[in-house]
Image (cartoon, rainbow, N blue to C red):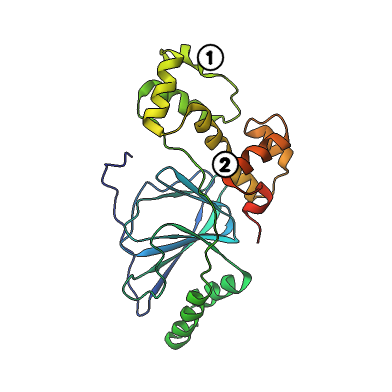
Amino acid sequence: MSPDSQAPVFDAPTGPTAMWFGVGSLRAGHWFEEHEHPQHQIVWAARGVMTVEIGAGRWVLPPTRALWIPGGVHHRTGTCDGAVMSGIFLEPDRSPANFPVPTMLRVPRLLHELFEHLTADTTTAVQRERAEGVVFDLLHPVEVIPIGARMPEDPRARHVAEALVADPADARTLHQFAVAAAASPRTLARTFVAETGITFGQWRTQVRLAASLPHLAAAMPLARIAARVGYATPSAYVAAFRREVGVSPGRYFAR
């Protein structure tokens, strides 16, 4: 869906307090279409790994991380290998927390237990109100850089981009892609800069790092991650990650 398209609006039901909870199991490869909510949303994976895409940014969420999505922000949520997705919807006029941009949050063990308490049928309205206040106290941001790259619209560059998204380890150069894309390497290079804001090499790096995040969140060994996303050695992958993100892969999801 292009940025100018009208995303569907999904309005969560309101409740007696600031929060409304939703839980659901997602099969491997399931993605919700791009949409928005009038409420703020906190989304996380109670089990497995979730991914949220907002514009060119991509946030990958293991069970220790959640994402605050401000109301009215278009986003797309899904999972590669299956997950149990949990979400809190917050009425903006009742919420004491208000992060103006998408924000990664820590999910410590206490927050997990509070979520279970709030979704239990036996929790009374008074208990719920008290627990919600503690949840708001525990919403601590994590400083991370979202990883990802905008897809080009030009059909020739799009052909190249889709091939790399499907297989980030594809090692073909722009000259080699040019034949299948029916365009000169120079034309493709100019198109990537014009439509994504970064060079083809930078775009490929972002796609590779984005593809590595679900594996990183699932604690896959670095050597296997590097090979899956196109790096010859783990050190080359770590160097690229640190250069683009500012921290090592091991620290990106550190508690």
- Name the residue tied to disc 2: 244
Quadrant of image for the C terminus: bottom right
**Residue 165, visible in the rendered structure:** no
Q: Element under label 1?
A: helix
* Residue 129 percent coordinates (x, y): 44, 83
Quadrant of image for the N terminus: top left
Please tell me which residue is depicted at 56% across the width and 29% down the height of the picture.
167
Please tell me which residue is depicted at 49% across the width and 27% down the height of the picture.
200
Q: Quadrant of residue 187?
A: top left
The residue under label 1 is which amino acid type?
Answer: Gln
Between 240 and 96, the one lying in front of the other is 240
* Residue 68 percent coordinates (x, y): 45, 61
Residue 139's place in the image compared with 46, above or below, is below
Label at residue 176? 1
Please tell me which residue is depicted at 36% across the width and 47% down the height of the picture.
34
Label at residue 121? none
Q: Nearer the viewer, mark 2 or mark 1?
A: 2
